[in-house]
């Protein structure tokens, strides 16, 4: 839209300034220096990877390739999202490994990860015995990731990390969510009609249902066990915390998940409504200063672990 507004041609000399003193912004065109015969810039009409005609949703500037099931970059992107830290947290599989597994025909959907064998991985470039074992162990560990992480890892449009958590807590298992009506879905806090429509569309696709069945067969957590939620102690119930820095004995995302499991609520900024600031290595100076100014108690890694283990 901006290219059309400016009337840009290929090879144009343009005037640029820093918008807000930071971001480069084209403010005009030096038409006098435009070469004869130069052509206007035309936005592409087809996906450069799979040649599918692009679509543009109403009131959105972005163009999309609708070929979600066969477009290689999209399939690879879905896999990268699934193994990412905020989803299944399979840290033994990086971006390059995902691409390698896909290009070798070993993995096409997230469920394929759980069918990988030692003899599939070991011959790949860059893999030896230890790297192969680490990869398979990382995949095995991900089977214990909680339901909300699996739900987020599915990559349902408009279902981010927070929404996935709220949906998991409300419906308790994937089957209840699959069968839910739009009215039942929008009854979940922070879930509107647009999200509900996206969820329904996702679960109406037979391929997506087949993926869920395959993930279930692979042993992933697709429900919240009633016994776990009913009896688990919640020493942080009613407490609001902010996390800053890195930690030695626990990964940052694991610590956040554990705090939430024990009833704590996480915010991103220190305010008078925060009960504790959990400060790790290289904690943000601004957060520490705000905590001191507001008399918010600062907990070390040892403090928060002791609180969760004993209170």
Image (tube, rainbow, N blue to C red):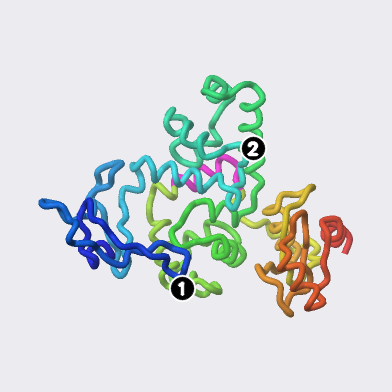
Q: Is 12 located above or below residue 186 in the figure?
A: above
Q: Is 76 located above or below residue 230 in the figure?
A: above
| Residue 163 sits in quarter | bottom right
Residue 68 magenta-highlighted: no
Residue 214 magenta-highlighted: yes
Residue found 28% across the figure and 61% down from its top:
56
| Quarter of the figure with the C terminus | bottom right
Q: Is 251 located above or below residue 193 in the figure?
A: above
Q: Is residue 199 visible?
A: no
Q: Secondary structure at mark 1?
A: loop
Q: Would you say the magenta stretch is mainly helix, strand or loop?
A: helix
* Label 2 vs 1, first from the N-terminus: 2
| Residue 19 sits in quarter | bottom left
Tell me residue 49's x, y (percent). 31, 41
| Quarter of the figure with the N terminus | bottom left
Tell me residue 104's x, y (percent). 44, 27
Which residues are drawn in magenta? 210-220
Q: In this figure, which residue is indicated by the disc labeled 2?
A: 138
Tell me residue 190's x, y (percent). 53, 73
Q: In this figure, which residue is indicated by the disc labeled 1?
A: 192
82 relative to 1 in the view: left or right: right
Q: Is 240 located above or below residue 256 in the figure?
A: below
């Amino acid at each position: 839209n901006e290219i059309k507004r400016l009337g840009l041609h290929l090879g144009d000399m343009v005037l640029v300034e820093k918008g807000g003193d930071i971001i480069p912004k084209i403010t005009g065109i030096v038409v006098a220096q435009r070469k004869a015969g130069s052509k206007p810039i035309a936005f592409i009409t087809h996906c450069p990877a799979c040649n599918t005609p692009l679509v543009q949703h109403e009131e959105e500037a972005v163009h999309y390739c609708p070929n979600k099931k066969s477009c290689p970059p999209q399939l690879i992107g879905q896999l990268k999202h699934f193994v990412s830290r905020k989803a299944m947290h399979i840290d033994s599989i990086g971006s390059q490994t995902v691409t390698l597994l896909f290009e070798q025909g070993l993995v096409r959907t997230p469920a394929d990860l759980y069918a990988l064998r030692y003899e599939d991985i070991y011959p790949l470039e860059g893999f030896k015995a230890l790297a192969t074992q680490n990869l398979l162990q990382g995949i095995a560990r991900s089977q214990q990731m909680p339901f909300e992480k699996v739900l987020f890892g599915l990559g349902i449009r408009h279902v981010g990390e927070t929404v996935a958590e709220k949906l998991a807590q409300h419906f308790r298992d994937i089957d209840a969510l699959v069968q839910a009506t739009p009215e039942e879905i929008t009854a979940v806090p922070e879930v509107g009609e647009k999200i509900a429509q996206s969820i329904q569309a996702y679960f109406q696709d037979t391929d997506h249902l087949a993926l869920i069945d395959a993930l279930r067969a692979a042993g992933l957590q697709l429900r919240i066990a009633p016994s776990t939620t009913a009896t688990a102690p919640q020493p942080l119930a009613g407490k609001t915390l902010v996390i800053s820095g890195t930690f030695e004995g626990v990964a940052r995302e694991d610590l956040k998940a554990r705090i939430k499991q024990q009833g704590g609520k996480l915010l991103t900024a220190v305010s008078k409504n925060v009960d504790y600031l959990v400060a790790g290595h290289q904690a943000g100076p601004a957060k520490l200063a705000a905590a001191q100014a507001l008399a918010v108690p600062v907990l070390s890694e040892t403090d928060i672990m002791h609180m969760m283990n004993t209170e």
